[in-house]
Amino acid sequence: MEIRSGYAHNPAKDQDIELHSGVELHYEDLGNEADPAVLLIMGLGAQLTLWHNEFCGKLVDRGYRVIRFDNRDVGLSSKLHGQKSGGKLIPGLLRSFVGLPSTSVYRLEDMAGDAAAVLDHLGIQRAHIVGASMGGMIAQVFAATYPQRTAGLGIIFSSNNSALLPPPAPKALLALLKGPHPSSPQEVIVANSVRVSKIIGSPGYPKSDEQLRADAEENYQRCFYPQGIGRHFGAIMGSGSLRGYDKKITAPTVVIHGKADRLMRPSGGKAIAAAIPGARLVLLDGMGHDLPEPLFERIVGELTTTFAESTQAR
């Protein structure tokens, strides 16, 4: 499977960010350029590598061009060094619980603009949009903001942050937000990544310690930038409830969620499916807050079923 890569430039300037040159976004482009495009958007602090090659390959084998990219503040894309994450955490969490936005350096809306910039750079006018976790939130904003550019929509283990949804399990949330000091040795960082993966991962499809460690080492060596996690979390709280966006979405939509997800509880996926007109909800036994390899075929099948609906509707 050929992987083409490069950088897309988003020249948009946020009022709260002094980035005069905009944001540079690292992307990878897989498959036949003539095939229908699928844009994959990953979640909070997560590099594009979490869309595993095998997962992307299954989409390519089904006749799709696959584009995955690093969000701002993660991986090989631009970092907003020195920028604070926004307001204080506890007040922000309380406001988020009731669906209200908070002060932030940038918001999900800005990150949806980044996704559009990747498509612009590649000359793609219309694509299927798939997002996981925070990426699913970005995907919701994108689909509502750019309806003519959204052929089909897939949202995996995400939420619309509407008021009074059950919060994450405290252990899962703290595992994600709190880790070793950034200057800690590699082995300490890797060990923490393994611990976090065990807490939020899929209990029905556990990975071996060896595989978790290998994945953590690969991601560490590609890029280790924990400072971006706080700003990503700030972007989520900065946008507040996405229900208003959901009601505007017109693309065929599938919402996929694990029944065993302790970080983004299944109620988040149910809320999205209830708010988007005509959305289809798929709940998977044993799946937590990751993409287990044994479920790749099932997840890709659900996505491509929805993509086919968009083709039939045209």
Image (spheres, rainbow, N blue to C red):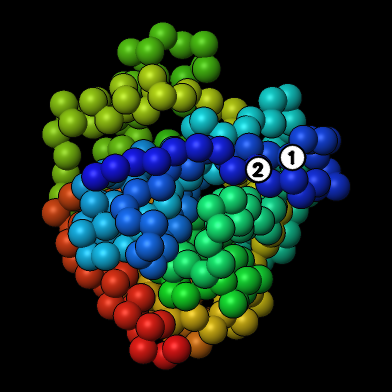
Residue appearing at x 56%, y 80% in the figure: 249
* Residue bearing the label numbered 1: 22
- The one of 160 and 310 positioned closer to us in this rendering: 310
Q: Is residue 214 left or right of residue 229?
A: left
* Residue bearing the label numbered 2: 9
- The one of 5 and 259 positioned closer to us in this rendering: 5
Q: Are marks 1 and 2 in contact (CB under 8 Å)?
A: yes
Specify which label sits upstream in the sequence, 1 or 2. Answer: 2
Distance between mark 1 and mark 2 Cα atoms: 7 Å
Residue appearing at x 80%, y 39% in the figure: 17
Element type where label 1 sits in the image: loop
Residue type (three-letter) at the residue carrying disc 1: Gly
The disc at residue 235 is none
Name the spot of residue 129 as percent of width and height, x first: 46, 65
The answer, for residue 127, to whether it is visible in the render is yes
Residue 239 picture quarter: bottom right
Name the spot of residue 311 as percent of width and height, x first: 38, 83
